Amino acid sequence: MNKLVLYADDDADDRAWVEEACKDVNAQLSVRFLENGKEVLKFLQSPAVPPLPSLIILDLNMPQLDGRQTLQQLKSHPDYQHIPVAVVTTSTSPLDRDACYFLGAKLFLVKPNSYREWRDIMHQLIPLAH
């Protein structure tokens, strides 16, 4: 059975690359793509939600509820604080990285510029999904 992963990113190209990279590396993950943190929280609070996700991946810069705000809400909620969260973003700022780790992120990665690099990122994310 594939593990459920929520991937929140408002960039359709990045979502497509992640989807292809998952297939390519045979990730055994069922990825549900969402466009912002508000959608992540809405999905988790839905009465019809299947088992909780094994991993949540957030972009930092999203409309409505950004990655930092979403991470903070996830880690302060008793039902979700145990779910590992990875941040995959265009930000190379050490301040963003440190803030995400402080808020409880398990991994902070800079978005790649090539498909091969997306595959490498998937290999780093897969072990987080438990």
Image (spheres, rainbow, N blue to C red):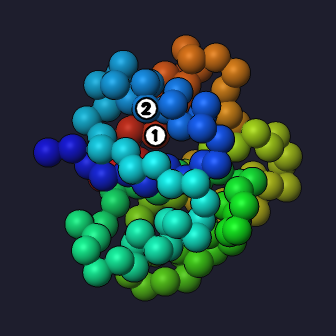
- Would residue 88 be found to the left or right of residue 92 on screen? left
Q: Residue at 37% across / 45% down in the picture?
A: 31
- Would residue 46 be found to the left or right of residue 17 on screen? left
Near mark 2 (Cα within 10 A), the count class, few <14, some 14-19 or many ≥20, is some
The quarter of the displayed image where residue 2 is located = top left
Helix or strand or loop: what does disc 1 sit on? helix
In this view, 97 is above or below 79: above
**Residue type at mark 1?**
Leu
Q: Residue at 33% across / 56% down in the picture?
A: 54
Q: Is residue 30 visible?
A: yes
Kindly identify which residue carries mark 1. 125
Q: Is residue 87 visible?
A: no
Q: Where residue 87 appears, x then y in whole percent?
A: 61, 50
Kindly identify which residue carries mark 2. 19
Marks 1 and 2, Cα distance to the nearest angstrom? 13 Å
> Considering depth in this image, is 124 or 118 the residue closer to the camera?
118
Q: Which mark is residue 31?
A: none
**Residue type at mark 2?**
Glu
- Would residue 91 be found to the left or right of residue 86 on screen? right
Q: Residue furthest left?
A: 1
Q: Where residue 106 appears, x then y in whole percent?
A: 54, 55
In this view, 8 is above or below 71: above
> Considering depth in this image, is 105 or 74 the residue closer to the camera?
74
Query: How many numbered marks have been drawn onto this rendered protein structure?
Result: 2
